[in-house]
Image: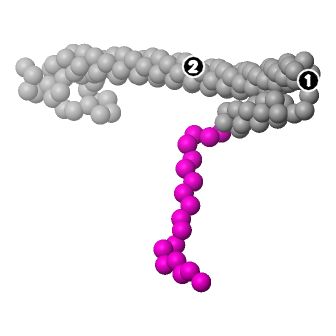
Amino acid sequence: MAHNDDPSYVFIERRGGGIGSFLLGILVGAGLGILFAPRSGEETRDEIREGAKRLGRQAEDALRQVRGAVGDTVDEVRHGLTERMDAARDAFESGRRTARETRDEMEHRVREAKDRVRAGIDAARRPPVAAPEGAPGAVEGSGPEGKFGS
C-alpha cells in the first residue's frame, strides 16, 4: 500500500467565462456531434445550415429582447431625469421669485425708514412753535415774549 504524504491539489482558473464561452462551447459541441454523426455529407451540411439558421434566429430574438429592455430602461431614466430637471427648474424659479419679492419688500421698508428719518431730521431743524401763554404744557418764558426772550 503506497502512502502519499503530499496532498494533491486541483486548481481551477476562472478567466472571464460567461455567456460567450458557454455559447462557444455549445457551437463547438454541436459542430463536432454533427460532423461525427453517421450521416451523408449532404445531410450533415443541411443539418449544419439549419443549426446555424436556428442559432441566428435565437441570437436575433435575444438581441431584440435586450434592445427592448435597454430601450425601456433608457426611456424610464430619461423620464425620471426630465421630471427631476423640471422639479429643479421649478424650485429655482420659485426661489428666484421669492428672492425678488423679499428684495422688493426690503427696499420698500428701507425707503419708508429713510423717509421717517428725513422727516425726523426736518422736524428737528425747524424752530419750535411756542404754545400760547397759559395753555397746558406751556413753559413760562418759552415764547418770544417770555421773561428771557426780550
User: Which image quarter: residue 25?
Assistant: top right
The N terminus - image quarter: bottom right
Residue that carries the numbered disc 1 in the rendered image: 40
Q: Residue at x 31, y 18 (%)?
A: 114
Against 18, residue 48 (above or below) is above
Q: Residue at x 62, y 40 (%)?
A: 17
Instruction: Please report contact status of discs 1 and 2: CB closer than 8 Å, yes or no.
Output: no
Circle nearer the viewer, 1 or 2: 1
In terms of secondary structure, where does tag 1 sit?
loop
Please state which of residues 8 and 40 is positioned toward the viewer in this rendering: 40
Against 12, residue 24 (above or below) is above
Q: Residue 128, percent across and down?
A: 22, 21
Please state which of residues 148 and 3 is positioned toward the viewer in this rendering: 3
Q: Is residue 71 magenta?
A: no
Q: How is the image coloured?
A: one colour
- 147 left or right of 1 in image: left
Against 64, residue 21 (above or below) is below
Q: Residue at x 54, y 57 (%)?
A: 11
User: Which image quarter: residue 112?
Assistant: top left
Residue that carries the numbered disc 2 in the rendered image: 89
Amino acid at pointer 2: Arg
Please state which of residues 7 and 65 is positioned toward the viewer in this rendering: 7
Please state which of residues 45 and 102 is positioned toward the viewer in this rendering: 45
Q: CA distance from mark 1 to mark 2?
A: 72 Å
Amino acid at pointer 1: Ser
Q: Which residues are magenta?
A: 1-19
Asked whether residue 128 is in view, the answer is: no
- 20 left or right of 35 in image: left
Q: Residue 18, percent across and down?
A: 65, 39
